Image (tube, rainbow, N blue to C red):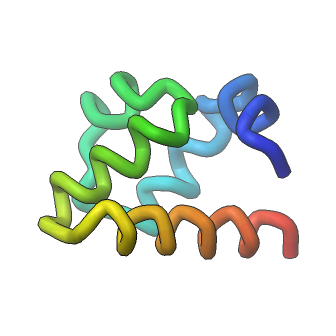
Amino acid sequence: MNWNQIEGNWKQFKGKIREQWGNLTDDHLDTIAGKRDQLVGSIQESYGISQEEAEKQVAEWERNLKD
């Protein structure tokens, strides 16, 4: 799954994002709008984690989408 597909189907992926990162609000998801870097930044900010950890979590989530 690439980010062009995720961005193009963002409304469908919002639910999956909320399942994984429940602290993200609808406002966050609207701002992210399918942009990977925005997702990483919002996770980093909402959970108080490093950018590296947020990147790691998003990469793991991406791998799980393929399964």
In the picture, measured across the screen, residue 3 lies left or right of residue 38, that is right
- Label total for image: 0
Residue at 38%, 24% in the rendered image: 30
From the viewer's side, name the closer residue of 50 and 34.
50
Note whether 67 is above or below 4 in the view shown: below
Image x and y of residue 36, in percent: 53, 41
Q: Is residue 32 left or right of residue 49?
A: right
Residue 16 lies, in percent from the top left, at 57, 56
Rendered residue at 53%/63% (across/down): 58
User: Please, which residue is most extreme toward the front here?
Assistant: 52
Answer with left or right where residue 6 lies relative to residue 30: right
Quadrant in the rendering for residue 29? top left
Q: Is 5 left, or right, of 39 in this rendering? A: right
Percent from the top left, x then y, of residue 61? 61, 68
Q: Based on the displayed image, in which of its 4 quarters is residue 11 positioned?
A: top right
- What is the x, y in percent for residue 13? 62, 44
Which residue sits at x=28%, y=46%?
42
Q: Is residue 38 above or below residue 41?
A: above
Q: Is residue 7 above or below residue 37?
A: above
- Vertical order, 62 against 5 (above or below): below
Point 77% across, 30% down: residue: 4
Picture quarter with the C terminus: bottom right
Between 56 and 8, the one lying in front of the other is 56
